[in-house]
Image (cartoon, rainbow, N blue to C red):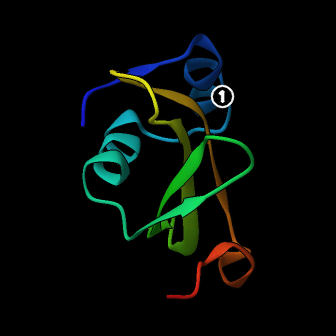
């Protein structure tokens, strides 16, 4: 997928200490893609960071080309966000 990073997501991954390589890995091969509000989708994968399991959620507007990465965050509330097939 072709994408660009918004200035907001660049600030947030730095502030939240999310490695860019991890964000890119989720974008290229997410465990799930689930719809969010409006036209954005959450590309998400479970990953271990610092010995703890997190869900890394990358919020993307993929209705445009290239797709725009809006924001990204990690959470321990995996079951809350994990989409059921």
Residue 65 in the image: x percent, y percent?
34, 22
Q: At 50% from the left edge and 73% from the top edge, which residue is drawn?
A: 51
Residue 38 in the image: x percent, y percent?
71, 43
Q: On the rendered structure, is 57 left or right of 77?
A: left
Compared to residue 38, the image places residue 48 above or below, namely below
Q: At 54% from the left edge and 16% from the top edge, which residue is drawn?
A: 6
> Looking at the rendering, which quadrant does residue 13 occupy?
top right
Badge 1: few (under 14), some or many (20 or more) residues near its Cα, within 10 Å?
some
Q: At 59% from the left edge and 11% from the top edge, which residue is drawn?
A: 7
Compared to residue 37, the image places residue 21 above or below, namely above
> Looking at the rendering, which quadrant does residue 79 occupy?
bottom right
The residue that disc 1 covers is 12
Q: In this view of the protein, which residue sits in the foreground, 51 or 79?
A: 79
Q: Quadrant of the N terminus?
A: top left
Q: At 65% from the left edge and 18% from the top edge, which residue is drawn?
A: 8
Residue 39 in the image: x percent, y percent?
62, 40
Secondary element under disc 1, as helix, strand or loop, is: helix
């Amino acid at each position: 997928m072709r994408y660009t990073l918004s200035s907001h997501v660049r600030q947030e991954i730095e502030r939240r200490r999310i490695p860019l390589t991890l964000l890119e890995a989720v974008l290229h091969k997410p465990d799930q893609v689930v719809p969010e509000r409006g036209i954005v989708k959450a590309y998400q994968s479970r990953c271990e960071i610092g010995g703890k399991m997190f869900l890394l959620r990358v919020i993307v507007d993929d209705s445009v080309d290239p797709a725009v990465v809006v924001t990204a965050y990690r959470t321990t509330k995996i079951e809350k966000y994990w989409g059921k097939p």
